[in-house]
């Protein structure tokens, strides 16, 4: 996030400097001082009379940011981070959960190459009120891959290609439904599926699933890898996390429907539920 903030600040600062250098400061006339003060007084009085109206009006930038991928994804990520922090804090008093959280929770570092670009897609619309793929491409070339190429199609969504620091060829397809505020991402590394990720809002929270290869065990000190599906559904500070190990294929899509919280994590190898601060579940073979 610090890297993202630095990139955004550098680019936006350059734009603001250019805009400022092209405009002239307004000149003030000493003789108009009384008139200016009178206008300010009248404006203050009008604002006071409209107090109730000012408080209920929607800021102009709210509608401008509605339906923008990066804005919506950030809202999801912040909500997920908040409940993850809550679970971590609550787990300190639960011996099994505290040492086994990693069996059911997603570690973004493992899939950062695929998720990081979501924070840039739509940044031009957020900043300037219009789409500028050139602007977003430059940001991605700085923060993601030097050879990043970004295109967009109304029917299929964003397509991003680039090479990571290890020389792997990456391809990301991101389709955002601005009406449902839901997202599907498909990530590929050297032609092979690296991640399938979906999320959608539910009443008071979100449902999401991640599908990628993760460590499922250990053999004589060597990590054992397997294809896994992680699921998450939460509302406020209550929710469930789950991981399915060594799955044969990606899970059924959750887009276009609201998953049932009670059955969403059925059959998981590792899972836990937190409700009013209390845990139930089974992690690493330990039921509680």
Image (cartoon, rainbow, N blue to C red):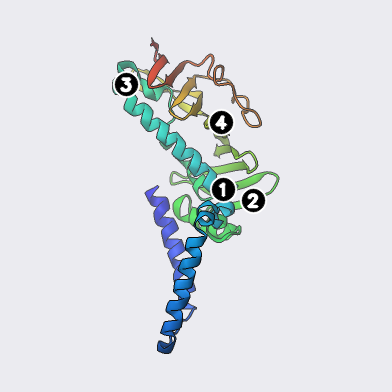
- At 55% from the left edge and 52% from the top edge, which residue is drawn? 62
x and y, in percent, of residue 241 in the image: 46, 23
Of marks 2 and 3, the one in the foreground: 3
- Give left or right: position of 202 versus 24: right
Q: Distance between the residues labelled 4 and 2?
A: 30 Å
Mark 4 secondary-structure assignment: loop
Residue 40, image quadrant: bottom left
Q: Distance between the residues labelled 4 and 3?
A: 31 Å
Considering only order in the chain, which callout, 3 or 1, is on the residue closer to the N terminus?
3
Q: Residue 216 carries which label?
A: none
Q: Mark 2 points at which residue?
A: 152
Mark 4, other Cα within 10 Å: few <14 / some 14–19 / many ≥20? few
Considering only order in the chain, which callout, 3 or 4, is on the residue closer to the N terminus?
3
169 versus 260 height, above or below? below
Q: Mark 4 points at which residue?
A: 203
Q: In which quadrant is the C terminus drawn?
A: top left
Considering only order in the chain, which callout, 3 or 2, is on the residue closer to the N terminus?
3
Q: How far apart are marks 2 and 3 (CA)?
A: 43 Å
158 versus 222 height, above or below? below
Of marks 4 and 3, the one in the foreground: 4
Q: Residue furthest right?
A: 155
Q: Nearer the viewer, residue 278 or 54?
A: 54
Of marks 4 and 2, the one in the foreground: 4
Q: Name the residue under label 1.
A: 161
Mark 3 secondary-structure assignment: helix
Mark 2 secondary-structure assignment: strand
Considering only order in the chain, which callout, 2 or 4, is on the residue closer to the N terminus?
2
Q: Distance between the residues labelled 2 and 1?
A: 12 Å
Q: Distance between the residues labelled 4 and 1?
A: 35 Å
């Amino acid at each position: 996030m610090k890297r993202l903030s630095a990139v955004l600040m550098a680019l936006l600062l350059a734009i603001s400097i250019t805009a400022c250098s092209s405009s002239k400061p307004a000149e003030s006339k000493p003789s108009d001082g009384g008139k200016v003060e009178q206008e300010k007084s009248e404006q203050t009085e009008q604002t006071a009379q409209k107090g109730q109206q000012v408080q209920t009006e929607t800021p102009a930038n709210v509608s401008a940011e509605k339906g923008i991928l990066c804005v919506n994804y950030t809202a999801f990520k912040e909500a997920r981070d908040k409940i993850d922090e809550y679970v971590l804090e609550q787990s300190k008093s639960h011996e099994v959960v505290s040492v086994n959280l990693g069996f059911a929770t997603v570690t973004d570092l493992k899939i950062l190459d695929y998720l990081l670009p979501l924070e840039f897609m739509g940044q031009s619309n957020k900043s300037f009120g219009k789409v500028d793929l050139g602007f977003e491409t430059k940001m991605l070339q700085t923060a993601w891959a030097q050879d990043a190429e970004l295109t967009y199609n109304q029917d299929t969504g964003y397509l991003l290609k680039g090479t990571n620091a290890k020389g792997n060829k990456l391809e990301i397809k991101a389709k955002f439904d601005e009406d449902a505020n839901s997202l599907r991402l498909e990530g590929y590394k050297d032609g092979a599926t690296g991640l399938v990720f979906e999320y959608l809002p539910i009443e008071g929270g979100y449902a999401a699933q991640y599908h990628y290869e993760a460590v499922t065990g250990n053999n004589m000190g060597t990590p054992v890898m397997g294809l896994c599906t992680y699921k998450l559904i939460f509302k406020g500070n209550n929710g469930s996390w789950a991981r399915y190990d060594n799955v044969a294929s990606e899970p059924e899509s959750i887009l276009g429907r609201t998953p049932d919280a009670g059955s969403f994590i059925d059959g998981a190898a590792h899972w836990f539920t937190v409700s009013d601060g209390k845990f139930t579940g089974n992690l690493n073979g330990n039921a509680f």
